[in-house]
Amino acid sequence: MSQFKVVVTDYEYSTFAPEEAVLDKLGIQLTFEQCKTEDDVIAACKDADALINQYAPITRKVIEQLDNCKVISRYGVGFNTIDVDAATEKGIIVGNVTDYCLDEVSNHAMALLLSLARKVTLLNNSVKNGVWDFKVAVPIYRLQGQTLGLVGFGNIPQTVARKAKAFDLNVIAYDPFVAPEVAAAQNVELVTLEELCKRSDYLSVHVPLNAQTEKMISTKEFAMMKKEAFIINTARGPIIDEQALIEALQAGTIAGAGLDVLETEPIAADNPLLAMDNVILNPHSAFYSVEAETELKRKTAENVADVLSGYYPTYLVNKAVKEKVKLEDKL
């Protein structure tokens, strides 16, 4: 019998070979659940030593009922499914994986940017509908010298910036938590959000979803943008106020959008964005490659293995937990 109980709260995966390869070394056999609600999680995980989480809600109510839990590790960069403050108060370590899809998401953001710039998707659809005429995409502007504005300047947008410069784009960024020297080292100018909106020809969103960032791009921000500007989102849907975006697109306040994420996923059949030729929609796929998924699963399990072996994980979300509980006291 396994010394520790490790529960996968919910999942969309068909294999767990990467996780098992890591946890087998500790003699741990995973327990698999498909929790949808808080009560589901409590019932399945009350006595668990560790949780691996995808979408199931790990709220304060849930955390208060976790009697033995030492670590919650989430599949992904974001951790908005977990009440981190409640976990910290209870001395539970929270882990994520911040670097598994840097290449994939940055490439996807650039792919959306290039398709919007060159109107590749619009022209493809036009040809397939029997229209052989480049003028359906007029106007198209030269990419060289235009400005890409990055909302956030963490690992992924820094990678986007490097790739964008290969296309001779000028790159600016808004991130109040990044030191100016970090941006300066990459020849990126840090600006206010207002200035970012005013100057950007392409505005790409790369911040985590939390109480401060939810709907941070809304009517006010769209009103400041150029009419020729495009917005791109490969982060989380609710960071953009979707109704405000729809209204801005309908009014011609901005030129278009490339969205890998939406407020509600999957998208509703009556969402006006589906009928807009100047909007590219993808099904939250920017993170994915065969290699990225394998890396994500392995590193998520390594967070658990580290903690259950007496170490803080490489990807520690709630660093304040170190001040509250000594790790050796948890094991």
Image (spheres, rainbow, N blue to C red):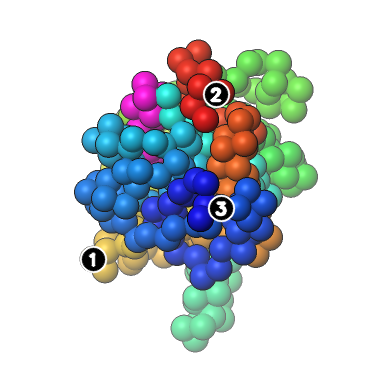
| Residue at numbered disc 2 | 327
Crowding at mark 1 (Cα within 10 Å: few <14, some 14-19, many 20+): few
Secondary-structure class at tag 2: helix
What residue sits 53% from the left and 18% below the top?
A: 326
Q: Can residue 109 be seen in this view?
A: no
On residue 28, which mark appears?
A: 3
The residue type indicated by label 3 comes to: Ile
Of callouts 2 and 1, the N-terminal one? 1
Of callouts 2 and 3, the N-terminal one? 3
Q: Residue furthest bottom?
A: 130
Q: Is residue 123 left or right of residue 72?
A: right
Q: Position of residue 221 (x, y in %)?
A: 38, 32
Nearest the camera: 44 or 192? Answer: 44
Task: Check the image and report above or below for 313 versus 125.
Answer: above
Question: What segment is highlighted magenta in the picture?
Answer: 76-90
Disc 3 to disc 1: CB gap under 8 Å: no
What residue sits 32% from the left and 52% below the top?
A: 44
Q: Which residue lies furthest to the top in this view?
A: 323
Q: In this view, does 260 lie to the left or right of 142?
A: left
The residue type indicated by label 2 comes to: Leu
Tag in front: 3 or 1: 3
| Residue at numbered disc 1 | 270
Q: Where is residue 239 in the image (x, y as percent from the top left)?
A: 38, 39
Tag in front: 2 or 1: 2
Q: Is residue 81 magenta?
A: yes
Crowding at mark 3 (Cα within 10 Å: few <14, some 14-19, many 20+): some
Task: Check the image and report above or below for 193 versus 168.
Answer: above
What's the CA distance linking mark 2 and mark 3? 20 Å
What residue sits 27% from the left and 46% below the top?
A: 42
What's the CA distance linking mark 3 and mark 1? 46 Å
Q: Quadrant of residue 10?
A: bottom left
The residue type indicated by label 1 comes to: Asp
